Amino acid sequence: MNRKLELRTRWILVTGASSGLGEEMARSIARDQGGNVLVVARRREKLEALCEELRSRYGVQAAFIAADLSRPEDVERVFTEATREREIHGVILNAGVAYWGDALKLEWSEFQSMLNTNVTSLVRLSTLFARYLVERGTRGGLMFVSSVAGFIPVPYQAAYSGTKAFVTSYGQALTQELRPQGVSVTVFAPGGISTEMLDRTGLSNRFKSGDLGMMSAADCAAHAVRAFIHRKELYIPGLLNQTLTLAARLLPRGFLAQRTAAMYRPER
Ligand SMILES: NC(=O)c1ccc[n+]([C@@H]2O[C@H](COP(=O)([O-])OP(=O)(O)OC[C@H]3O[C@@H](n4cnc5c(N)ncnc54)[C@H](OP(=O)(O)O)[C@@H]3O)[C@@H](O)[C@H]2O)c1
């Protein structure tokens, strides 16, 4: 599928847009591409403020849906509300949560919520929107935000890296199924990004902004939007991350996990 994904005046849905990478992707779509954005997350006031900013600064249309993607009923509502009054042309499934610490200390409810948000909602929304885009025949696109952690079994992020391994595998497989039907699927797999996620997990004590390979959310978003527009099947931003994932595909997984354990082991 050669033709670029056109975003100007089209509606693009971005999940997880109340902070970090999602917020910056929404900003980049509005500012640099003239696209209309429909943003989704739990924090209504953040989404409201972002929409107001994008409308007034960049003259695009912007709307939001406050939803908890760990709840199946909210996931269904996002699709229904998103498609009720507007034609959606692109969907970026970016919302995600992480956990850093001993696997045995991860609360069961927290694991289920992570699985629902990172995996189940992504499969459900991508299925609903892919059917919708195929039916319309408008050559729309989907993008899934995965992670370098999806290529490596990351000790102390065992469940999180597992969810991202799923996202990458599912996305790359779906790419092949949907391409003949005129819909592109991009898997975007960044490494460390300086966002609230690092603060929330405590990883900001281990990896600092300015460290080698750490990206700002705005820089990372610029890579992501470019990959989406060019309908890249798999895109890993940054030379260090590209080298890491190449090594991850060549080296034995046990060795990788062992080396990564030393980097991620929390202090006792
Ligand atoms: N930061 C990194 O180092 C890094 C590296 C590789 C990949 N990634 C991936 O990049 C994506 C964005 O993360 P980020 O770094 O930008 O983190 P972030 O700033 O914490 O953003 C996460 C976004 O997801 C939303 N979200 C979380 N749980 C949700 C739920 N149950 N329902 C709806 N929305 C939910 C959050 O909004 P609300 O809290 O308002 O709901 C927020 O907008 C994630 O998929 C993450 O796994 C991050």
Image: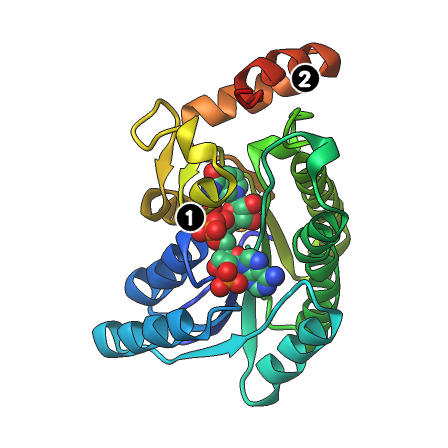
Helix, strand or loop at label 1? It is helix
Decide if ligand 1 comes within 8 Å of the CB at mark 1.
yes
Mark 2–mark 1 CB contact (< 8 Å):
no
How many marks the image carries: the answer is 2
* Placement of 48 over or under 261, stated as above or below: below
Residue at the far bottom in the pictured view: 85
From the viewer's side, name the closer residue of 153 and 132.
Answer: 153
Quickly name the residue at label 1: 196
Residue 94 placement (x, y as % from top left): 55, 55
Q: Residues within 10 Å of mark 1 (few under 14, many from 20)?
A: few
Type of amino acid at the residue the image marks with label 1: Glu
* C-alpha span from label 2 to label 1: 25 Å
Task: Determine whether, in the image, residue 100 is placed left or right of residue 193.
Answer: right
Q: Earlier in the sequence, mark 2 or mark 1?
A: 1
Residue type for callout 2: Ala
Query: Would you name the residue on which mark 2 appears?
Result: 257
Quarter of the image holding residue 28?
bottom left
Query: Pointer 2: residues within 10 angstroms few (<14), some, or many (20+)?
Result: some
| Residue that appears at 70% across and 40% down | 106
Vertically, is 196 above or below 240? below
